[in-house]
Image (cartoon, rainbow, N blue to C red):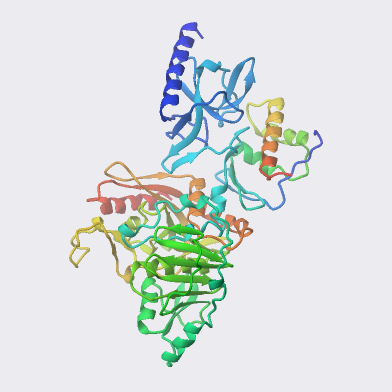
Amino acid sequence: VADDVPRRAAGTSYEVIDGEAVVIDPDGQELVTLNGVGTLVWEHLDGRRGITELVDVLLPQLDGVSREVLDRDVRDYLDELRGAGLVE
Amino acid sequence: VSDESDDGARAKAALLRARVASSRLWLRVHGASMGRAIPWGAEVLLAEAARPRRGEIWAFLRSDRRIVVHRYRRRANGAYVFQGDAKYAPDEPVAADVLVGRVVAVRTGDGVRNLSERARLTGWVVESGRSAARRLLRRGAVNGVVVEPATDDERVDEEPGERLATDDGGSLVADQVAAHGRSSSRSEAARVTQPAAPPQQVVELGGLAVGLVAEDRAGLQALAGVVPGAPAVDAAPAIEARATSGPPPHPSGPPDSTAGPLSLWHVGGDLVVRHGDGVVARAGGESVEIGPPEAGVGFRLAFLTALAHVLQRPDRLVVHAAAIARGGGARLVLGGTGTGKSTVAFGALRAGWEVLADDLVVLVDRDGAPVVWGVPRAITVPGELFTGRDVRAAHDGTRRRRELPPATISPGARPVVGVVVVDHATTPRGTVEPVSGHEALRLLLAGLAPLAARDHVHDVLPLLARVARLPAVRLRLGADTSVRVDDTVALLERVEKGS
């Protein structure tokens, strides 16, 4: 899974308000609000980076987190977003 | 950590668990460690649960015997690790015997929110749910169009969003309605008995020319009387509203939804609205047909609801809101029925602002900036706010709402410069405080008239987000009605200075 290249699912739309994204799923059925960290990750899901590279980019932008923890959290988060149909 | 304090924490946890098991235990939360999931000052409802599951929010006792409400992350050597959503580092692991219970609901000034199953795992997903998006969908979500009634005793819906969760499906195409068309025998008959050109006039609503057509003068007056503030225009109508002497047919089956006295059906792309007093309106494409024409609240509610349906487009949104303007810029006043939009509008008039509408507005995107029109029905104000100088007619002593003259409504469009979320304070005097853009967006979504099709949900988000990013304040109206209007005038001054 290290080569997994996540991207925002086609047909999702989102808007960032006060640093937190509001995402609508492709069916227009789910409205999901992400917090600041979640939004930062979401905006980097452009389908050009694998998870390892994604963590490389995110790590310097976040305080107080180790690479291992961030890597695990990003994977958890992507699983959750996949479950909601927001990431493919 | 001494054994003594651990014992104390364990004892207190056991006591609290017993309370959770026997009653509904709400705790007030202080602190911001849960970010937007549990705002500062919110109350949380606890429920009994065996063991935390990953992503759930739980209350537990720290060794200093303070109750902490954080999200469960993982097990560590038999203990449980929790973490605040707004904290990157987890808490010290705690043992099972200091757990109190799972948070199942959060109560804020906006009401009670049941915690979504989806708001789990990392906590980076703050909130997730179908209901808000569903409000945008026509099917099963028609109540969003509900228009505030003119009298308290006819109140339609305490909270327009609340009843929208049910989705009854939309397969209620009744033959009776499917066979109905504009060239029905009723209109033919009407034409025979009224050989002269039917009375009509064209008015502007939401930037569109709307033709009002009736079989007689009374019918025209009934239509025009619903939107007395709409200016007459000399233009070809883009939308036609026709009053017929009898009610258009409505489906014989049960309604797709109801909202107070209104029953609503979806037939193809059309909306059929029937009021309990017998008025029926049918709206679809670019036309509304309604009958029988009368001056009552039933006609008014049915007509406005039908009108909202035809005015609504992905690029022209009809929103349950008041709009007040000063210095050329308008603020949308958001809040459910009964929260005080009309009171703010009334205070705004007193303070010298313009009022575009007190209940229903049309929002469009003009070159990247939101612009608003009012749907200019008469402003209706709670009776208890009136003093002698406002009412020349005898006060009927009830709490009924009173209509202000049409001249109090300002026509035309204004750029939107801010949002006011209106609410009631428990203190005699009201307050003004900042409010998040996300709350503004939630209220905009909740107050949005339904859209024609699912894919349009994506189309409306940019415009609503643009409004939600504007300066937003929460204006809580003072509880003392004897000074509420003057107090509101003072609060509006602060609103104006604040942004």
Question: In the image, residue B56 lies at what x, y percent?
Answer: 57, 30
Q: In the depicted view, which residue is nearer to us: B330 or B327?
A: B330
Q: For this view, does B454 lie left or right of residue B17?
A: right
Across and down, in percent, residue B398 comes to 22, 58
Q: Residue furthest bottom?
A: B195
Q: Which residue in the rendered view is the most extreme toward the top?
A: B3
**Depicted B429 relative to depicted A74: above or below:** below
Along the line of sight, the residue nearer the viewer: B479 or B216? B216
Q: Nearer the viewer, residue B393 or A54?
A: B393
Does B213 sit left or right of B285 as displayed? Answer: left
For image coordinates 37% across by 48% down, the residue present is B423
For image coordinates 29% across by 41% down, the residue present is B427
Residue B182 x, y percent position in the rendering:
53, 80
Q: Is residue B204 above or below residue B439?
A: below
Is B421 placed above or below B106 here? below
Q: Can residue B50 be seen by looking at this rendering? A: yes
Where residue B356 sits: x, y (%)?
40, 65
Say whether residue B40 is left or right of residue A42.
Answer: left
| Residue at (40% x, 70% y) in the render | B279
* Quadrant position of residue B343: bottom left
Q: Is residue B353 left or right of residue A54?
A: left
**Which residue is at 48% across, 29% downward?**
B47
* Residue B326 is at least partly visible in this image: no
Number of marks in picture? 0
Rendered image quadrant of residue B284: bottom right
Residue nearest the observer in this picture, A15 or B395: B395
